[in-house]
Amino acid sequence: MPPKNNFKKKTAPSDGSMTPHIPTLAEQLSYLHLPKPFKNPHYTKNVNRRVKNLKTVLGQEREREKAERERRRQVKSEAGEQAPQDTMNVDGETNRAKAVEEDEETPTYTSIEAPPSIWPQKRYCDITGLEAPYTDPATGLRYHDKSVYEVVRNLSASTAKEYLSARGVNSIVK
């Protein structure tokens, strides 16, 4: 087997005269050498700055919100020590404690503790992806209209089962 990269190196002319570099078409059409007036010539990149991913940013935001709640809770408790008479609600809780609880349970953009939607879940056609008001009783496939039902009716049992498994339904097809 011959050795790899077995090519002769081109030698420069021995008379010392180099041929001038002929720019390629890409180099001729390049905008790289043109001045860029929109860039700040005195800008220096901050080498200490690092890129943070979304998970890190959301975690830091959650910690910041938690620290802010703790700070507000301490300010309220200090104000409560100065004014010991708290008014009572009918339930027996103080207004201050109820306000703190409501503040903690307020859903935010980053919180995942928001309650589920009260609206019914939308059903989509297994074939087209459009909204599906109908379900085939034999296969369990959802379909959008009469034309899609013709396709659903002609599907084999194995194909119908594949469509159901794509939706995440593991039922026995009759």
Image: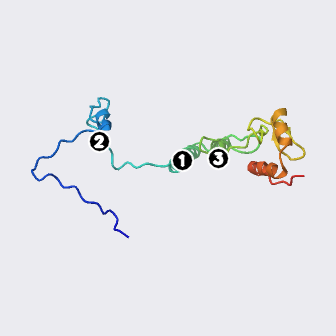
Say whether marks 1 and 2 touch (CB < 8 Å).
Answer: no
Kindly report the distance in space between the C-alpha atoms of the residues bearing marks 1 and 2: 28 Å
Disc assigned to residue 44? 2
Disc assigned to residue 82? none
Secondary structure beneath dot 3 equals loop
**Mark 3: few, some, or many residues within 10 Å (few <14, many ≥20)?**
few
As displayed, is residue 129 above or below residue 70? above
Kindly report the distance in space between the C-alpha atoms of the residues bearing marks 2 and 3: 40 Å
Q: Identify the residue at horizontal 30%, vertical 36% (top origin).
A: 32
Q: Which residue is mark 1?
A: 58
Residue at the far bottom: name it: 1
Q: Identify the residue at horizontal 67%, vertical 41% (top origin).
A: 95
Quadrant assignment, res 82 = top right
Kindly report the distance in space between the C-alpha atoms of the residues bearing marks 1 and 3: 12 Å
Q: Earlier in the sequence, mark 2 or mark 3?
A: 2
Say whether marks 1 and 3 touch (CB < 8 Å).
Answer: no
Secondary structure beneath dot 1 equals helix
Say whether marks 2 and 3 touch (CB < 8 Å).
Answer: no
Q: Earlier in the sequence, mark 1 or mark 2?
A: 2
